[in-house]
Image (tube, rainbow, N blue to C red):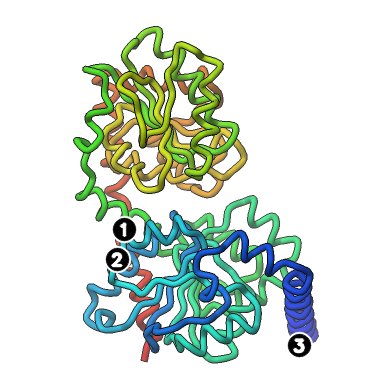
Amino acid sequence: MQDTKRETWTWRAGMAAYRLGISAFFGGGGLRWLRKKYAVGLDERMGRLEGVPEGGVWVHAVSVGEVQSASALIREMKGDGRGATLPCLLSTVTQTGREMAERLIGEAARMIYSPWDTPKYVRSALDAARPRAYVAMETERWPQMLSELKARGIPAFLANGRLSEKSFGKLRKQAPFWRGVLSCFERLLVRFDEDREHFLALGVPAERIVVTGDCKVDALKARKEEADPSRWGHLRRGDAPLFVAGSTHRGEDEIVIAAFRELRSRHPGARLVIVPRHPERALFVVAAALPYPELQADLLSRLPEDWDVAVADRIGPLFDLYSAADAAFVGGSLVQKGGQNPLEPALLGIPAAHGPDMADFPDTARMDRMGAAKRVGNCRELADAWERALAPSERERVRGACRDYFDTLGGAAGRTWEVIRSYLN
């Protein structure tokens, strides 16, 4: 009893401190800064929602990756007899996330920008939408929103939940507060056993956690049918290989370009396409090739007739680019960013390398063991991995390993929706 009282007091004190901090931020000029940073969708971010459907399911996906997971869940929801008639509201934070949602989800959901996590804005948005359920994708844990949902008796779910070792370490430092936040979820529907163990270690009761698998697998399987390698066939220089580096972060582009330069001595006509995780970095990535005058680099949207390195400057083309590649690299992994999604090239059977930091995708270790992906640590190892990937026998081996890996996956979106819909009256 004493421990329960102490836990409740810690949660309330933590929420009071959180609200005080948010109020201080907004009162101290934070709103002016946010107005400049998020000029698009300002009314919605301040909780002023107009014409939104009431009484449906509100799904929140912060950006591109989470939107992909959400697309599979919404597709499952709309294909279900009970869910097809339910309105769906999808909120994002970033503009790139919104653009991806429009491509993948279209009219299956009404799209808004998520309200900032203050009592005033959250209450205003909930008053307008009056959802029957709220679903946060992957890592989204906004204390005020979750607290308000709980107070109103609206069931909230964490879907495709993930908690990396790094994030777990941060939350553990304030475990009593975060236990209170996580207690606002009816169920935590997580990807893998590793995620479950981390939530358990924070003190989340075992009966609240369900391992459902990775919804991104279902989303990607649906997109695979739409992938069109021929769309980027013109990027090839004759029969020479095409390499794609996807979702790179600052500090990786130079390594990728250096590895590509090493290969050029053996494959003179080879070309490289780099897709930075943040398209606004595109010109900086082009500049990373300047130390090598023999490499002609430019933006993918304005390529000259003769070029060697192209840099994508908009969101969206990566999946099709992977399908056209001979070999790939998955970014966010040679720097401490937790890695990006290794499933995309693997689903297409493309030999793909990644760096040592794949903390956000713990199942990558199993992919490596099965031969569906390859870990590298530096420029030379990346060049060697790409060189081996060009051998027909290696490509066939990787395709078989990828098929074997995906045979063990699938159905996560259906399992997730089955739990959520059981709470809808």
- Check contact, mark 2 vs mark 1: CB within 8 A: yes
Residue at numbered disc 3: 1
Q: CA distance from mark 2 to mark 1?
A: 6 Å
Left or right: residue 203 compared with residue 12? left
Q: Residue at x 36, y 20 (%)?
A: 307
Q: Which mark is residue 103?
A: 1
The type of residue carrying mark 3 is Met
Q: Splitting the image into 4 quarters, where does residue 324 fall? A: top left
Q: Nearer the viewer, mark 1 or mark 3?
A: 1
- Check contact, mark 1 vs mark 3: CB within 8 A: no
Eyeballing the image, is 18 above or below 321?
A: below
In this orientation, does residue 236 appear?
Answer: yes
Residue at numbered disc 2: 106
Q: Residue at x 39, y 76 (%)?
A: 89
Decide which of 281, 342 is in the foreground and name it: 281
Q: Splitting the image into 4 quarters, where does residue 133 fall? A: bottom left
Q: Nearer the viewer, mark 2 or mark 3?
A: 2
* Image location (x, y in percent) of residue 297: 43, 23
Q: Secondary structure at mark 1?
A: helix
The type of residue carrying mark 2 is Gly
Q: CA distance from mark 2 to mark 3?
A: 50 Å
Q: CA distance from mark 1 to mark 3?
A: 51 Å
The type of residue carrying mark 1 is Arg
